[in-house]
Image (spheres, rainbow, N blue to C red):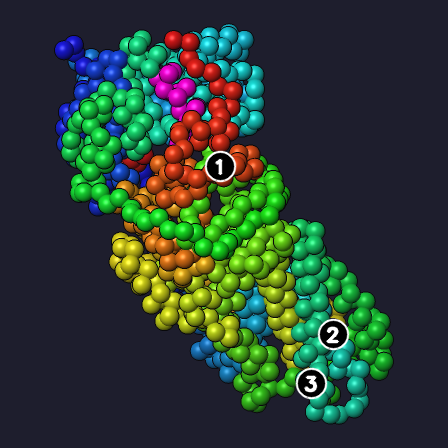
């Protein structure tokens, strides 16, 4: 075997109170697509930050083509041929594509030459992009292309990609994969971070699996099932949510041509959304981020009001009712943003339990709050959903994302809703907790509630949904039975490929 | 290298320690200021903090503590409710003036009738006057999205002009030999806000301030409305999600702070001041903002901060007369207190770390 492009030996990094990486070693060969797999908090981010020169390792060494490599800062990493596409884009909305790219360069060429090079690279790799367009007008997929092209202009030997597909439709994912395969065929190595196992099986040659900061296994994704990889990641056998089919009952929630203007300047207004959810049923709603998910949740929670007849709960028109009133009637919701929306960061879990549970859990009577009851309710949620926290008086902010998510979902589930609407219920949650949350949603439906799951995770939707629809620019696609839907069909429901073309390989 | 690191939980210790640290820092730097002015810093500090309480003439100054502290606490309690929710009523001074004019006006309307119900009517009129004046920025904010900071502040100057106008016109004492100002309410028993216990400084406004402290404490810790106020201040989106109506909360918070300021004005006009004059207002409405923050927007804290602030007022006056310190130096001293409080406040939410910065 040839000399590895990047070789990592015994890399260790500790933060006060937590070891982020402990003795991690692996090699990346030239032209290899290497997956880095692990749950949240497994140490993936710290590891790539060390490779990219953002964090200094405590011990261990890295070599690039046999030569010692210890980048003190990202600039040195880029000089050594390492480039990185971050999960969160760092682009200026008000500037053009070319200006944004020039900003990241140490010695930018004249704008006209740069634009020409951007065009060349974008055509070669099947990432069509007009250098003169303003970034604020681009879709999430197009913004990602800007970041990728910014990296490719440096002719990297190793391209690090952190969760690149979370903002893409299935068709866009295919196009991205063609681009990555072309890069690979030219000898560029790719370090691909993801927790989407099917993607890794489709794309990657080798996989390194991290758990609690340690390397626990390597595998060849093509020869390993997704389930096996998941169990390596989690370290135990994975509980797959189970359900039985039953006849759906009466209509619990109906939306009749729901149209709401988005309150935000860059939001997506809802346009004529019509749907019905019956008792005992789970409706899955897919969609790329920013296609009206937040607005739909707001229109259902009561934060956004509509005409009264547009939202009907158990035969009662509630479109004009506020959140408290809807909650009393049994329509509960859990928004995507945990900190600051679903929970108040600096308030204790007891106080956060009262945030939505005040009415239905008898915490408030005559306007006065019974903190004892709120504490009991918080304790119940913590116990049933295995929320890891020292106690109910800890601030919501002090919980990890996954634990807070369990608390937020648990708080709604344990109020016995007639209708529950959740947005991204398992976003950023580890596999075990995600399974617990999905099972709770299914159990709720089995108990006769109607559940609406809004999510960008297609695997999750296929696992829990009876029927399936997609949001695209504030409109709802046709709703179809989830069983038997193909990925292509789902992609088309989500709005297709947004005019992307496949790389000219 | 020194850097700040966000605490996982706000520190309970520092929440109580920072006001003390701010007072100590103010004493040190205030002392330096007095030294630079050629006064003995220790004597100056002692004159401000010690003499009013335990000095030779303390029997005279101690009641003053309640007389000055009462309105500060009453106004600051009202303001703190809004501040907790992120609603910034800066115009308590104007609401204080309007409360005084309405309260005194209601009383003078009955002159010279003596009846038990006159004083309660004045109390209601005072609260109503302040409430109405605060509703102006409230309604404008709810209806048109105007900035309540600017509107409430500008209305202070309108109120001051109005005060001058009634002192010279509507409320002018017909037997006042042409001097500006109303009749003296201290000489009108039914309208006089007399001391509840002779010689203590404890008048009805001080009682109202203590009731307000208890009211605010119960509201914030036990009542859903208080919970919604805190929730709105900490996480506005979460508050909306919980079902709080921002408009109603804005009107409530501005309304109650206006009513409390109006009450304070009315008690002052009918008690210690005795009459409505052109220069009736002495800045209680603005100082109360400092008191509210010095007390960490907590009712008990505000009670203590109000007394401390009253102490620096009284001590400052003594220092002016006995040491010849300029009044600007005293004001600067009071300003320092707020400055240091805000500066050390960062320690509640952050801890200081020394050492090499970690690139993260």
| Magenta span contains residue A179 | yes
Q: Earlier in the sequence, mark 3 or mark 2?
A: 2
For the magenta stretch, what is the residue range? A166-180
Residue B102's tag is 2
Residue A406's tag is none
Q: Position of residue A162 (x, y in %)?
A: 34, 28
When the figure is inspected, residue B174 is found, relative to residue A241, above or below; the finding is below
When the figure is inspected, residue B234 is found, relative to residue B181, above or below; the finding is above
Residue bearing the label numbered 1: A470
**Label 1: chain letter:** A
Q: Position of residue A207 (x, y in %)?
A: 22, 26
Answer with left or right where residue A159 lies relative to residue B217.
left
Q: Secondary structure at mark 3?
A: helix
Q: Note whether residue B49 is visible.
A: no
Looking at the image, which is closer to me, A445 or A68?
A: A445
Residue bearing the label numbered 3: B119
Looking at the image, which is closer to me, B208 or B235?
A: B235
């Amino acid at each position: 075997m040839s000399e590895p492009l990047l070789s990592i030996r015994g890399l260790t990094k500790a933060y006060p109170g937590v070891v982020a990486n402990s003795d991690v070693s692996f090699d990346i060969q030239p032209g290899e697509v290497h997956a880095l797999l692990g749950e949240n908090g497994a140490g993936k981010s710290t590891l790539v930050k060390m490779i990219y020169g953002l964090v200094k390792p405590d011990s261990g060494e890295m070599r690039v083509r046999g030569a010692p490599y210890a980048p003190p800062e990202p600039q040195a990493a880029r000089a050594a041929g390492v480039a990185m596409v971050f999960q969160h884009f760092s682009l200026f909305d008000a500037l053009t594509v070319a200006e944004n790219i020039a900003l990241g360069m140490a010695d930018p060429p004249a704008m006209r030459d740069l634009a020409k090079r951007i065009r060349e690279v974008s055509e070669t790799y099947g990432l069509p992009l007009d250098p003169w367009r303003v970034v604020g007008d681009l879709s999430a997929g197009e913004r990602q292309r800007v970041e990728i092209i910014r990296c490719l202009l440096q002719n990297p030997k190793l391209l690090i990609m952190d969760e690149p597909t979370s903002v893409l439709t299935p068709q866009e994912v295919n196009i991205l994969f063609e681009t990555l395969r072309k890069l690979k065929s030219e000898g560029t190595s790719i370090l691909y971070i993801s927790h989407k196992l099917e993607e890794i099986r489709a794309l990657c040659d080798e996989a390194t699996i991290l758990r609690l900061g340690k390397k626990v296994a390597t595998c060849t994704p093509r020869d390993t099932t997704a389930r096996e990889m998941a169990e390596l990641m989690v370290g135990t056998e994975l509980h797959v949510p189970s359900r039985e089919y039953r006849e759906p009952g009466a209509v619990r929630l109906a939306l009749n041509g729901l149209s709401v203007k988005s309150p935000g300047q860059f939001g997506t207004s809802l346009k004529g959304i019509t749907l019905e959810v019956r008792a005992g049923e789970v409706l899955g709603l897919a969609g790329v981020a920013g296609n009206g998910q937040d607005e739909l949740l707001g229109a259902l929670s009561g934060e956004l009001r509509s005409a009264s007849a547009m939202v009907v709960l158990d035969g009662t028109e509630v479109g004009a009712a506020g959140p408290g009133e809807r909650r009393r009637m049994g329509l509960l919701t859990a928004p995507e943003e945990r900190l600051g929306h679903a929970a108040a960061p600096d308030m204790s879990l007891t106080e956060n339990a009262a945030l939505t549970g005040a009415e239905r859990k008898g915490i408030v009577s005559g306007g006065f709050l019974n903190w004892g009851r709120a504490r009991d309710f918080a304790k119940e949620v913590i116990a049933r959903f295995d929320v890891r926290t020292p106690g109910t008086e800890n601030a919501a902010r002090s919980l990890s994302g996954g634990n807070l998510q369990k608390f937020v979902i648990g708080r709604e589930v344990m109020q016995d809703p007639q209708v529950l609407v959740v947005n991204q219920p398992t976003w950023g949650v580890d596999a075990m907790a995600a399974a617990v949350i999905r099972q709770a949603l299914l159990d709720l439906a089995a108990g006769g509630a109607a559940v609406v799951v809004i999510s960008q995770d297609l695997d999750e939707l296929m696992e829990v949904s009876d029927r399936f629809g997609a949001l695209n620019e504030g409109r709802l696609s046709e709703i179809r039975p989830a069983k038997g839907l193909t990925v292509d069909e789902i992609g088309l429901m989500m709005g297709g490929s947004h005019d992307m073309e496949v790389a000219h390989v | 290298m020194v850097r700040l690191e966000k605490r996982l939980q706000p520190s309970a210790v520092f929440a109580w320690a920072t006001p003390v640290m701010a007072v100590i820092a103010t004493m040190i730097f205030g002392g330096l200021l007095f030294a630079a002015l050629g006064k003995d810093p220790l004597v100056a500090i002692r004159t401000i903090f010690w003499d009013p309480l335990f000095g030779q003439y303390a029997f005279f100054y101690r009641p003053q503590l309640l007389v000055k502290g009462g309105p500060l606490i009453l106004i600051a309690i009202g303001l703190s409710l809004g501040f907790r929710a992120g609603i910034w009523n800066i115009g308590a001074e104007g609401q204080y003036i309007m409360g005084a004019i309405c309260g005194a006006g209601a009383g003078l309307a009955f002159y010279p009738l003596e009846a038990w119900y006159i004083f309660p009517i004045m109390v209601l009129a005072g609260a109503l006057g302040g409430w109405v004046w605060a509703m102006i920025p409230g309604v404008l904010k709810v209806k048109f999205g105007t900035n309540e900071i600017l509107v409430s502040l500008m209305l202070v100057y309108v109120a001051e002009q109005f005060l001058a106008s009634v002192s010279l016109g509507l409320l002018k004492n017909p037997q006042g030999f042409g001097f500006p100002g109303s009749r003296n309410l201290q000489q009108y028993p039914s309208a006089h806000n007399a001391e509840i216990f002779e010689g203590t400084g404890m008048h009805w406004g001080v009682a109202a301030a203590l009731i307000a402290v208890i009211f605010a404490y119960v509201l914030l810790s036990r009542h859903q409305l208080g919970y919604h106020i805190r929730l709105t201040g900490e996480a506005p989106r979460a508050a909306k999600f919980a079902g709080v109506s921002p408009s109603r909360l804005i009107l409530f918070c501005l309304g109650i702070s206006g009513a409390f300021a109006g009450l304070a004005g009315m008690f002052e006009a009918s008690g210690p001041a005795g009459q409505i004059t052109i220069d009736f207002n002495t800045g209680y409405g603005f100082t109360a903002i400092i008191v509210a923050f010095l007390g960490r927007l907590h009712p008990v804290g505000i009670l203590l901060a109000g007394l401390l602030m009253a102490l620096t007022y009284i001590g400052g006056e003594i220092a002016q007369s006995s040491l010849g310190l300029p009044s600007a130096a005293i004001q600067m001293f009071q300003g320092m207190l707020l400055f240091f409080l805000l500066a050390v406040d960062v320690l509640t939410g952050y801890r200081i770390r020394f050492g090499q910065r970690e690139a993260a």
